[in-house]
Image (cartoon, grey):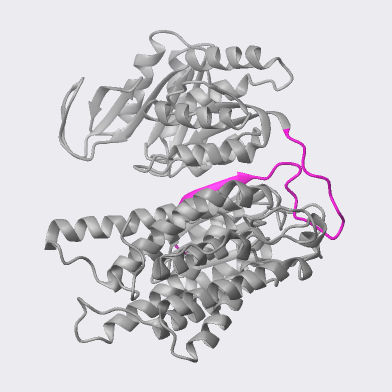
Amino acid sequence: MAQVPQTFFDALAVRTWCGLALETLGRAREEIDAINVYPVADGDTGTNLYLTVESAVAAVEAVFAGHAARSGPEGPTLADAVRAMAHGALIGARGNSGTILAQLLRGMSQVLADHESGHADGKTAHADGQGLRLALRHAADSARQAVAHPVEGTVLTVASAAADAADAACGARGDCGTVARAAYEGASAALAATPGQLPVLERAGVVDAGGRGLVAVLGALVETFTGERPRDGAATVTAGASGVGEDASPHGACADTAAGAGQDGPAFEVIYLLEAEDTAVARLRERLDALGDSLVVVGGDGLWNVHVHVDDAGAAVEAGIEAGRPYRIRITHFGAGDVHTTGAERPPRERAQRAVVAVVPGEGLAGLYAEAGATTVLARPGEPPASGELVQAVRRAHAREVVLLPNDAELRHTAAAAAEQARTEGIRVALIPTRSAVQGIAALAVHEPERRFDEDVVSMTSAAGATRYAEVTVAERQAWTMAGICQAGDVLGLIDGDVAVIGSDVTATARSVLDRMLAAGGEMVTLVLGDEAPDTIAEHLEGRVREGYLAVDTVVYRGGRQGAVLLIGVE
């Protein structure tokens, strides 16, 4: 952690602020999660904000490390640092609250980067109190514009109040510390007033969760420029006499029609990154707004983060495909109790007895697993989920007992760490060491929540273990394998994790892999097609099974963008 206080807003101050914000949210995360009541009471606002800032911190640290390796001790410019912060938050944003925080940071970065570009000496340029004031104003305005239907009493209100207070403080040409403290105090006062703006907060006796998270981040900004951590009393505010002291909504920052929403809200939360032009995104907003609610689209310069609650998750993803190239798609199925809050008071949601949490490699399988009742974590190619994401998914499942399916041999230790963390929170977790999504499908097929937990786990483990797995993929570079040397562009057939076939044609390689697997027997073949699989491959392989292996059934699923061209399971 860099030394505090910082005098001006320069690259080092950005680094310090991000680190302090992460520490602050780490301390406040559980309390913020606990008061999440609007608009979906699924208790993950603090976690979403923490993961969003964690991604911003990683991006800023990468810029400092990269600059040190290339340029020596001078360090990155303010523009380098704030752009990295904004980009990291954008690509790592979680939930509605994290998405809006990402836009707030992006709005600040746009002003601060422009402020630096106006200085002759870009290496030493920095922002003063006036620059910070302008950045906070632009952040609040841009975040409000990103939300389809802004609601007062949320993080948007708190952000606007922070900017208003900064404007007043800068009238006396305050320095960065003065402006930061004014913004913090204005945000804290606005946070305390949120229960009077949203009846659901008043009934629950809490303040808005997303707004509370922003107050925590602004408190870290004060500490950056003054060296003093603000007293918790200024930020820990509740309504009435509840005594709860944190934020209230992972989607509390959200943006939808408030008290008038129906009792039964949309069933799915859909989030994805999108590469698209501005004109296409304008059309996308209109389409998604008609499909659901809680719509927030943030970003720019060709990269966007899209968040929406819908009943038809497939339609939300298809809208993204029409607009550009969606990826890192995350689909979360809200539990029966996770409906959007309404004017009628509602008791806290009861925990389910048992749930399944699974890591899946593509959006197609995410939908399949979700339909079967599992809570899913999407593993992007080359970007496996961290243990924190798995812990978050276990919490989101909201069950006393959880079966965790990592579906990847490389994730076993990560999943074990997540399971151990969840157990410290009183959740009974069983980790089944599935090494492929097809093994997870087999385990999920025999899952029976009404059975005793141990019996269910044994049955699922047995089904997964009895499923041999394979994948067909394309080599990215030359390498030694169990089947010989492969070249970049070769088609590889891996059986149980080892390269068994090297070919030049996807269909022919897949057929060879399937024949090898069925030579040892089998009753069921599962094929999961990636986006890049040939159109005729499923028909060809199904025909091969019918002709050469009597009494063997075949089932085909669309996996979407899953990394591998084809996944194969044989039971």
Q: Residue 332: within the magenta?
A: yes
How many marks the image carries: the answer is: 0
Q: Where is residue 221 in the image (x, y as percent from the top left)?
A: 45, 67
- In the displayed structure image, the side of residue 521 where residue 376 appears, left or right: right
Q: Position of residue 363 (x, y in %)?
A: 51, 44
From this view, report whether residue 270 is shown above or below residue 191. Answer: above
Q: Where is residue 196 in the image (x, y as percent from the top left)?
A: 78, 69
Between residue 536 and residue 344, name the one nearer to us: 344
- In the displayed structure image, the side of residue 458 where residue 5 appears, left or right: left
From this view, report whether residue 291 is shown above or below residue 486. Answer: below
Provide the major secondary structure of the magenta segment: loop
Q: Give the range drawn in magenta.
A: 323-351
**Location of the N terminus (image quadrant):** bottom left
Give the residue at x 37% y 37%. 565
Residue placed furthest toward the right: 344
Give the residue at x 42% y 26%. 412
Residue 394's image quarter?
Answer: top right
Q: Can residue 526 be seen in this view?
A: no
Give the residue at x 43% y 66%. 276
From this view, report whether residue 316 is shown above or below residue 162. Answer: above
Residue 162's image quarter?
Answer: bottom right
From this view, report whether residue 249 is shown above or below residue 106. Answer: above
Residue 159's image quarter?
Answer: bottom right
Q: Position of residue 271 (x, y in %)?
A: 54, 54
Give the residue at x 69% y 20%. 448
Q: Residue 211: within the magenta?
A: no
